[in-house]
Amino acid sequence: MDSPSRSSVIVIGAGVSGLSAAKVLVDNGIDDVVILEASDRIGGRVCKENFGGVSVELGAGWIVGVGGKEPNPVWELALKSSLRTCFSDYSNARYNIYDHRSGKIFPSGVAADSYKKAVDTAIQNLRNQGTDADDVSIVSEPPCTPKTPMELAIDFILHDFEMAEVEPISTYLDFGEREFLVADERGYEYLLYKMAEDFLFTSEGKVSDSRLKLNKVVREIQHSRTGVTVTTEDGCIYEANYVVLSVSIGVLQSDLISFTPSLPRWKTEAIEKCDVMVYTKIFLKFPYKFWPCGPGKEFFIYAHERRGYYTFWQNMENAYPGSNILVVTITNGESKRVEAQSDEETLRESMEVLRDMFGPDIPDAIDILVPRWWSNRFQRGSYSNYPIISDCQIVQNIKEPIGRIFFTGEHTSERFNGYVHGGYLAGIDTSNALLEEMRKDKERKSEGQSFLLEPLLALTGSLTLKQAETVSGLHKCDLPTQLYLNGKLGIQEAIL
């Protein structure tokens, strides 16, 4: 069992926000930082796995927001690390929509018209949401609900993939609309290891620093005006002046971590109001290619009566030529349904869909990989999702510190929630706020010490001595007990 030696800051979670937060603290001289990570690795929802002979990204897979007026910090890290990436062009996906009944691609003119109609409807929906409900002078036509398989498929693409045609996404506005798929054997997580190398000891490509503690599942955080005590599932106890909590919004909504005393109602209500997206990429390995390849063919869509049913497909030839891997993305309800069933059942359903599109003679997949982000108690989902028309106060309340507990993560980023760069920047912002609080706390203690020293000097009758000498010469029993707490002098401690 670890002894409860006190550190300045405990960072809970070693994902991108936790690591960026810890780096800022160490860079500013706070060396006694302890990082508690529940799993056996760093990275959080940035996670690779070897599948079919290549490295595939189970979680975050793209660097989103490149080519704009401002440099994306994650893209800058990728360039610095020479991370291999591939540009993803989604624009032709709308022309590769397969009718599940005939197996044929819908004519491009029909697809283009349906897509434009869906975009117009989505924009009208946003306008309606932003209209004051009490303003009866504003009357708009009720939006059309998608009904046909094609309409349902396009609706899924527009909303579940957050296409820029509909929503003014801050990431695209600030950093650009280009997206690059990470296709590097070292994985997306390599960027996090390079970040860790800047402030943690590493050896042979692994973090060997004793300040990073893996397999430490935090179950309770006790907090007071004087500090925090963190208890892990294995019975270890850690004490610190502050905590930076970088767990996901899904974990905050779960019962994994308890707080003593409990979080205030306004905080828990804000946490519950944040939607959690579940985004599942299912990987299928085949003995050979049977799907179209080449320019404009990387992405294709399956139109079905059930919205989101194995809708969005990608072939990995652009990323890994000759890999013979297809990826299908599902979200939310479909993700949870698939997570609950066996991989064999998921494989069967996937093959039925592929045979609807490419005929009965295609080969069976020889392997399948199904991530389970919703079932993972250390994640409980993929990323946060705030409606485009939402109360900004919700985000503010989620990231607002509670005493000595500071909250961070992509879900605390009002402009970039749901993205890796959102988590990265949130960690930096949170640590900067914590550093400012630590500076103020130090000033308060210094002022309190000066305030208390004057009467103490008079009590000793040794006004000619230096203040430090006077205090050090006193026995603690000579001081009023209400001024002696934890062996420290200070106005804050005195009034507790």
Image (spheres, helix red, strand yellow):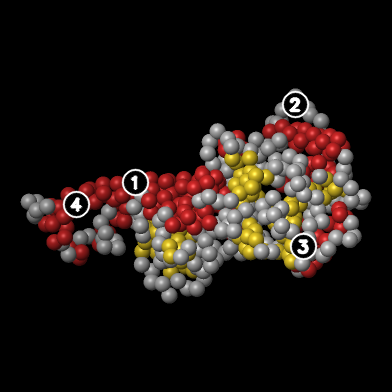
Name the residue carrying label 3: 286
Question: Which residue does the image show at 46% across and 47% down from the upper left?
Answer: 428
Which mark is first along the chain, 2 or 1?
Answer: 2
Q: Is residue 200 above or below residue 302?
A: below
Between the residue at mark 1 and the residue at mark 2, the CA separation in whole angstroms equals 50 Å
Residue 453 disc label: 4
Q: Residue furthest bottom?
A: 1
Which mark is first along the chain, 1 or 3?
Answer: 3
Which mark is first along the chain, 4 or 2?
Answer: 2
Q: Are marks 1 and 4 in contact (CB under 8 Å)?
A: no
Give the left or right position of residue 280, taking residue 82 as reference. right
Viewer-proximal residue, 79 or 211?
A: 79
Q: Residue furthest front?
A: 322
Q: Are marks 1 and 2 in contact (CB under 8 Å)?
A: no
Give the left or right position of residue 426, taking residue 127 as reference. left
**Residue type at the position of mark 2:** Ile
Closer to us: mark 2 or mark 4? 2
**Residue type at the position of mark 4:** Leu
Name the residue carrying label 2: 138
Closer to us: mark 1 or mark 4? 1
Question: Which residue does the image show at 53% across and 50% down from the upper left?
Answer: 82
Viewer-proximal residue, 409 or 397?
A: 409
Viewer-proximal residue, 135 or 358?
A: 358
Q: Secondary structure at mark 2?
A: loop
Closer to us: mark 1 or mark 2? 1
Report x, y in % for residue 277. 67, 52
Crowd band around label 3 with a 10 angstrom C-alpha radius: few (<14), some (14–19), many (20+) = some
Between the residue at mark 4 and the residue at mark 3, the CA separation in whole angstroms equals 77 Å
Report x, y in % for residue 202. 43, 62
Closer to us: mark 3 or mark 1? 3
Between the residue at mark 2 and the residue at mark 4, the CA separation in whole angstroms equals 68 Å
